[in-house]
């Protein structure tokens, strides 16, 4: 039964034969074969973690290792010697050069000839003027561009700008550069001539620097004189030259109106040199009566004509009359365009109307129809029976006005104060209840028609 019964695999019996490697069969007391895990009679493989070895094994193993290592080193040394022969030669050459060199590690730092070491521009005094000059140009250019785009900020920003300029502009060269920057900006941009003239007037009063060559105002007038001396050439030059000259003329006109010169007694006056310069410039413009020169002369006279006319009249000079006569001659003889001729005629008309100025009206207590043209301006307008209007300026005003008043008094007596015949015994409620015959007839027709439409529906 035991022989025929097959046990489950691994359920107790051994299928290994006694000669199977790695196992040993031992006999027990009951004759049952016992199997041990390892067969001690056969050698085992070396474990991954080597167990402690005996002294004999250690000596034998170390001898084998040392022998193999020596052989391996000898082979590597032979290959290294064959590959490193050029490198050893180079090392030998370098060592020989180092031993024969005269250089020292403690020698001073080598600086090539002509080489300048870097120095901080803030610390160096020689470069202070150079850097401040660049900053001055940038600062002035930015401020002028700001005023050109926002002229309304002039009053709020000019004081701060002047304080900055007083801290930067300390030499004659810087002052000349400042004058040139402002002049170029004022003549290059036509709309900046007014703001530029105001700026020049303010700086002439508040800039502290005053070198021996002159203060800000004097240097500015010298710069303007340079262009003034070239006026006869500029009026006959090409288009670009004329354009620059015309911008200069208009800027000089604004400068005459705004630049103030202190006087010993009394209020400040305008620059006398600019008054004579403007007269000569206008004569030069009319001497070459082309359209561009004539347009520039018209603009200049519209800008400064009233002030120039008053100044020359106070001095008993007839320069403005001479200019008007020249304009009339140009209109008759010159071959200018039709539009320019109309501009010249309008200018003559403007001067005849006292440059469009309205004199102050006399006081109300002294006003009469003879000395005040606006005497009847605020008077009411009345209408006659046929609808004809009349005012207090009409010669028949008194007669017509009295007629109107009499007619109002007549209706007032008949109709009462508001034009209605009022009686104390008059009953408003009775008047509202009663209807006129026409109204009653119309109301009856309306009721009949409404009834007929309702029946049809």
Image (cartoon, rainbow, N blue to C red):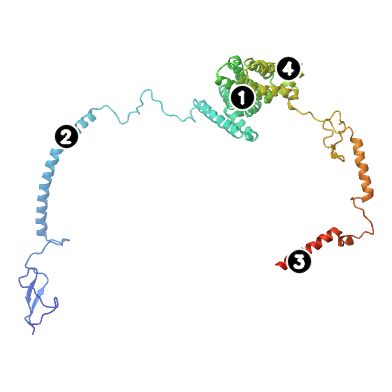
User: Helix, strand, or loop for circle 3?
Assistant: helix
Closer to the eye: label 2 or 4? 4
Q: Are marks 1 and 4 in contact (CB under 8 Å)?
A: no
Specify whether 178 is left or right of 301: left
User: Which numbered disc flags the more N-terminal residue, 3 or 2?
Assistant: 2
Q: Are marks 3 and 2 in contact (CB under 8 Å)?
A: no
User: Helix, strand, or loop for circle 4?
Assistant: helix
Closer to the eye: label 1 or 4? 4
User: Which numbered disc flags the more N-terminal residue, 1 or 4?
Assistant: 1
Q: Where in the figure is residue 441, as x and y percent of width and height?
A: 83, 60
Q: Is residue 63 above or below residue 331?
A: below
Residue linked to disc 1:
209
Residue linked to disc 4:
321
Mark 3–mark 4 distance (CA, rounded to whole Å): 92 Å
Closer to the eye: label 1 or 3? 3
User: Helix, strand, or loop for circle 2?
Assistant: helix
User: Which numbered disc flags the more N-terminal residue, 2 or 4?
Assistant: 2
Mark 1–mark 2 distance (CA, rounded to whole Å): 78 Å
The quarter of the image holding the C terminus is bottom right
Q: Specify the label residue 86 is tagged with.
A: 2
Residue 56 appearing in the image: yes
User: Which numbered disc flags the more N-terminal residue, 1 or 2?
Assistant: 2
Residue 264 appearing in the image: no
Residue linked to disc 3:
451
Specify whether 150 is left or right of 37: right
Q: Are marks 1 and 3 in contact (CB under 8 Å)?
A: no
Mark 3–mark 2 distance (CA, rounded to whole Å): 139 Å
């Amino acid at each position: 039964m035991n022989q025929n019964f097959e046990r489950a695999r691994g359920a107790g019996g051994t299928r290994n034969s006694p000669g199977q490697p790695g196992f040993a069969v031992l006999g027990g007391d009951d004759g049952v074969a016992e199997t041990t895990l390892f067969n001690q009679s056969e050698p085992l493989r070396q474990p991954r973690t080597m167990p402690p070895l005996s002294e004999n094994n250690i000596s034998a193993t170390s001898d084998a290792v040392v022998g193999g290592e020596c052989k391996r080193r000898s082979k590597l040394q032979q290959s290294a010697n064959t590959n490193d022969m050029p490198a050893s030669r180079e090392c030998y050459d370098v060592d020989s050069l180092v031993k024969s060199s005269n250089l020292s590690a403690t020698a001073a730092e080598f600086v090539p000839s002509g080489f300048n070491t870097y120095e901080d521009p803030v610390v160096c005094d020689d470069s202070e003027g150079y850097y401040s000059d660049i900053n001055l140009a940038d600062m002035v250019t930015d401020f002028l561009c700001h005023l050109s785009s926002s002229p309304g900020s002039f009053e709020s920003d000019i004081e701060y700008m002047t304080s900055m300029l007083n801290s930067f502009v300390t030499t004659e060269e810087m002052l000349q550069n400042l004058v040139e920057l402002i002049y170029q900006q004022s003549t290059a941009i036509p709309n900046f001539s007014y703001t530029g003239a105001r700026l020049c007037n303010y700086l002439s009063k508040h800039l502290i620097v005053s070198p021996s060559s002159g203060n800000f105002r004097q240097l500015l007038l010298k710069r303007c004189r340079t262009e003034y001396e070239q006026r006869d050439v500029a009026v006959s030059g090409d288009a670009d030259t004329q354009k620059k000259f015309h911008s200069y003329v208009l800027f000089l006109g604004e400068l005459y109106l705004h630049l103030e010169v202190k006087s010993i007694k009394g209020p400040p006056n305008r620059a006398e040199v600019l008054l004579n310069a403007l007269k000569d410039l206008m004569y030069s413009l009319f001497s070459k009566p082309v359209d561009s020169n004539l347009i520039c002369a018209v603009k200049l006279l519209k800008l400064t004509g009233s002030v120039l006319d008053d100044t020359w009249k106070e001095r008993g000079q007839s320069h403005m009359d001479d200019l008007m006569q020249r304009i009339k001659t140009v209109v008759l003889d010159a071959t200018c365009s039709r539009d320019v001729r109309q501009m010249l005629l309008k200018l003559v008309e403007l001067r005849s109307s006292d440059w469009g100025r309205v004199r102050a009206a006399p006081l109300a207590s002294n006003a009469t129809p003879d000395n005040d043209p606006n005497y009847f301006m605020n008077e009411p307008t009345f209408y006659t029976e046929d609808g004809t209007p009349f005012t207090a300026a009409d010669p028949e005003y008194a007669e017509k006005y009295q007629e109107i008043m009499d007619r109002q008094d007549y209706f007032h007596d008949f109709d009462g104060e508001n034009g209605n015949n009022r009686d104390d015994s008059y009953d408003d409620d009775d008047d509202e209840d009663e209807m006129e015959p026409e109204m009653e007839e119309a109301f009856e027709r309306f009721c009949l028609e409404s009834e007929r439409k309702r029946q049809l529906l």
